[in-house]
Amino acid sequence: VTSPQGRFDAAALLDGELLEDTEAFGKHLMYRFSGERWVHIHLGLFGKIRTVHTPVDTPRETVRLRLSTDQWFTDLVGAPRCAMIGPDERATLLERLGPDPLRPEADPHEAWTRIARSRQPVAALLMNQQVVAGVGNVFRAEVLFRSGLNPFVEGRALPQDGWNALWEDLRRLMRAGVRANRIVSTRPEHRERRRGRARRSDATYVYGRTDEPCRVCGTLIRRTDLMGRRLYWCPSCQ
DNA sequence: GCTAAATGTTGAT
DNA sequence: TCAACCTTTAGCT
């Protein structure tokens, strides 16, 4: 365990210790080391983890954390959070997170109790990590489109079966994302194809498609700012 | 070579 | 509601 950039203080403490497990809760990633010690990582907007097989290269100056063995090394760059924590800090962190659709034990009803009494728009609730953990701007936009939901509907106006369907689709989309290592929201019949090759821009229905025609109805996709984040939607389908 | 933008969160106002 | 923060890259000149 090293910190070429020098800003991960605990590197010396963990160097040579056993890495026992890795975990993810929503967007929070953890390396568990022996002795109830975790490295807590949040990638924020532009953090990246790159794992490479040896031969080891010289790390860039910006590498906050490097883990290396004889066979491989992995570099963390650009993350706003990378710190060693103990069981108490970890527990506090997890208490503040809503259910994560990727975790088998997650209970969507926990989210529902908050949604059902909120006057916030469902688009804002989906991005709130205390309500649902792991959903970001792309999944929010796409899952709302796929459910045909207006993003501005208040949480308390959302029917419970509507929420359950949304949750199931989130699980499906997020699991597919893990499998493919990228987000693909469009169903095959809605992907434009050129010479049989899928294009990168085929992956979403609404995210990043401002003023482009909706893949389903042709209406121009709209974009607005909601609580400091860009929100995309089809005013006709949703 | 410069600037803006990007799948996010926090803390101050 | 807004700025600050972390870094890289695309799109300009």
Image (cartoon, coloured by chain):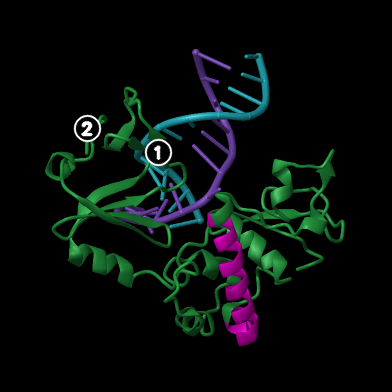
Chain colours: A green, B purple, C cyan
From the viewer's perspective, is A184 left or right of A53?
right
State the quadrant of the C terminus of chain A: bottom right
Foreground label between 1 and 2: 1
Principal SS element in the magenta part? helix
Q: Are marks 1 and 2 on the same chain?
A: yes
Residue at image location 69% in from the left, 42% down from the top: A200
Q: What residue type is labelled 1?
A: Thr
Residue A26 pos. (x, y %): 43, 62
Q: Place residue A219 in its image quadrant.
A: bottom right
Label 1: chain letter: A
Label annotation for residue A82: none
**Residue A51's disc number:** 1
Magenta segment range? A156-178
Label 2: chain letter:
A
| Residue drawn at the location 35% of the way across and 25% of the way down | A55
Task: Name the residue carrying label 2.
Answer: A6
Residue A146 in the image: state x and y as whole percent. Answer: 71, 66
Q: Is residue A102 left or right of residue A233?
A: left
Q: Say if the magenta span includes residue A159.
A: yes
Which of the pair A150/B3 is nearer the observer?
A: A150
What amino acid is found at the position of numbered circle 2 in the picture? Answer: Gly
Residue found at the far right of this picture: A218
Q: Is residue A55 left or right of residue A217?
A: left
Instruction: Find out whether the residues at labels 1 and 2 contact each other: C-beta distance under 8 Å.
Output: no
